[in-house]
Image: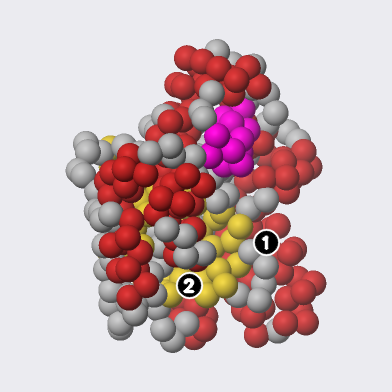
Amino acid sequence: MHPVVHSAPALDTVLTPALTPAPLPDAPMCRELAELVSARMTQEGVYETDIPGLDLFRVDAPTSCMSTVYEPSLCVIAQGRKVVQLGDREIVYGALSYMVSSVDLPVNGRVVDASPENPFLAVKINIDPAEVAELVLQLGDAAAYRGAVDCPYSACGLCVAQVDLGILNAMTRLVGLLDSPTDARVLAPLIQREIIYRALVGEMGSRMREFVSADSQSNRISRVISVLKDRFAEPLRVRELAEDVNMSESTLYHSFKQVTRMSPLQFQKKLRLHEARRLMLSEGLEAATASYRVGYESPSHFSREYSRMFGAPPRADVVKLRGETRMSVPA
């Protein structure tokens, strides 16, 4: 993703929670994961591996604030530290922590601890909500979920916890499979499923289950987010969205803000601006054409909101991004 200048709203800052001593990862295993990632990434950037749904990240210096859209995923930081801002919530987390995004979420973020000698290193796997739902059915009894994250935002779609030995071990084995393509074709999907399982029976369990339980408010908001993602260029009709998920407009608004830390309108705007930026960068569209494509009726209105979000007018921003030699890394 790419640098963006933001105003400084009042933020609630959430630090990675301090956990009980057991079972914490040991230093050798932590170093092993960092070394595996570092060995495959001699330069900073994003490495989309040959294992579907597995990405590696390296950053050699602190970054400015960047903007991106998280898809459902689980990310383990092997080394370094970063800050992620979701609406009015700011999350600080670092080495030996993992983050789960249960739904699509527009976020801002920056790496705050990285150097060429000790780069920021992270591993991410995509999460298929259907697979989460299948595992939830297999687990059955709610007693299988050992605990919930002690977090003031119990319904938020983005959460962080300290990684445990099970997840760290599985993630290390998954990255290690990059050396064995034949083994990876068979074992990688199994290990990815194991990682999701271990997250489900760990501290994130009740949170993740909430987003795939058909009768839960979080699941209803997840369905609303899917509609907004697919139809972001259309006018926002909150009443229709509320009716589709059998909620009142006020309940939808309140629950949506709990999950995303922003209103449906703010969420739609961020999706539109991200897509417009992609269209200008990847397909060479002019700003006005991109603005109409994503649902804006006024190019000048689009330009104002684009500048507010990305820190520069569309044309200047795209020229700058195309001229950058350093590969940007998603927030």
> In the rendered view, would you say 125 is above or below 249?
below
Query: Within the magenta stretch, is there residue 224?
Result: yes
Q: Which mark is residue 99?
A: none
The Cα atoms of the two marked residues, 2 and 1, are separated by: 19 Å
For the N terminus, give its image quadrant: bottom left
For the point 47% across and 14% down, which residue is it? 250
Whether residue 95 sits left or right of residue 230 in the image: it is left
Whether residue 256 sits left or right of residue 214 in the image: it is left
Check disc 1: other Cα within 10 Å, few if <14, some if 14-19, many if 20+. Answer: many
> In the rendered view, would you say 319 is above or below 217?
below
Tell me if residue 27 can be seen. Answer: no
For the point 64% across and 22% down, which residue is it? 245
Q: Which residue is mark 1?
A: 192
Q: Secondary structure at mark 1?
A: helix
Residue type marked 2: Val
For the point 38% across and 39% down, which residue is it? 298
Q: Position of residue 272 (x, y in %)?
A: 46, 44
Whether residue 262 sits left or right of residue 168 in the image: it is left
Q: Position of residue 172 (x, y in %)?
A: 58, 72
Image quarter of residue 95: bottom left
Q: Which residues are magenta?
A: 220-234
Image quarter of residue 78: bottom left
Q: Which mark is nearer the camera, 2 or 1?
A: 2
Q: Which residue is mark 2?
A: 46
Query: Within the magenta stretch, is there residue 52?
Result: no
Along the line of sight, the residue nearer the viewer: 205 or 115: 115
Which of the marked residues, 2 or 1, is nearer the chain's N terminus? 2
For the C terminus, give its image quadrant: bottom left
Dominant secondary structure of the residues highlighted in magenta in the image? helix
Along the line of sight, the residue nearer the viewer: 26 or 320: 320
Q: Position of residue 69 (x, y in %)?
A: 47, 51
Q: Position of residue 306 (x, y in %)?
A: 33, 48
